[in-house]
Image (cartoon, rainbow, N blue to C red):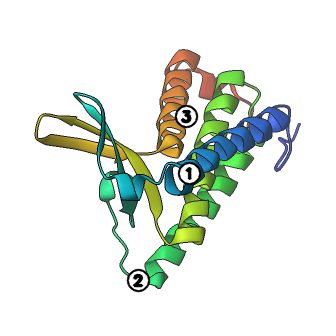
Amino acid sequence: MTKPTFWGPMSARILWVALIGMAIDQAFKLWMLFGYDIAARGRVELTPFLDLVMIWNYGISYGLLQQDGSLGRWLLIAATLVITIVFWIWGARSDRPLQALSLALVIGGALGNGIDRIAYGAVADFFHVHVGEFSWYVFNLADVWIVAGVAGLLYDSFRSGPNDAAKTPSM
């Protein structure tokens, strides 16, 4: 039996979770940028270790691969699209609910950050985690979805067991 390429048993669930995650991320970003106007407020302390800030990230997670020009920006957008398609196909072939949910979270987060790159040229990050003067990370909700999705994929891979791949019939 051939595995589906673009639509499978979990595809509707993946689509809805990804769209909802992307919509929540984008709505929060729009509110932070234009409703709350975080740029004009500056740093807002929420807890001793968490602040709201406005940072434009021209790279990927942890500020890696910073892009100064438009070529780099469009390469990151293209990479986002490729990754989204690969994860979508993986999800279409999946029949495991946790794996599908995890893939949906990664897709929703990637699309949310991709929309920022297209609309603003960079990703809007707001949550600053720190301990005293040690600054650890600035992130947004899309990043939360991506990290949660990757954690779910890792958990699902360990939960499934090392012999599951050997038991799967070849395509």
Separation of marks 1 and 3 at Cα, in angstroms: 29 Å
Q: In this view, does 34 lie above or below 77?
A: above
In which quadrant will I find the N terminus? Answer: top right
| Quarter occupied by residue 159 | top right
Report the residue marked by disc 2. 69
Task: Give residue 149's mark.
Answer: 3
Secondary structure of residue under mark 2 = loop
Question: Which residue type carries mark 2?
Answer: Gly
Q: Decide if residue 67 is in sight here.
A: yes
Instruction: Give the residue at the far left of this rendering.
Output: 133
Q: Which residue is at a point 50% across and 48% down the rendered structure image?
A: 36
Residue at 67% from the left image edge and 30% from the top image edge: 101
Where is residue 55? Give x, y as percent. Answer: 36, 57
- The quadrant the C terminus occupies is top right
Where 10 sits versus 160, above or below? below
**Which badge, 1 or 3, comes first in the chain's sequence?**
1
> Type of residue at label 1?
Gly
Of badges 3 and 2, nearer the viewer stands 2
Mark 1 or mark 2: name the one nearer the start of the chain.
Answer: 1
Residue 26: x %, y % from top left: 62, 50
Q: Identify which amino acid the numbered label 3 is placed on.
A: Gly
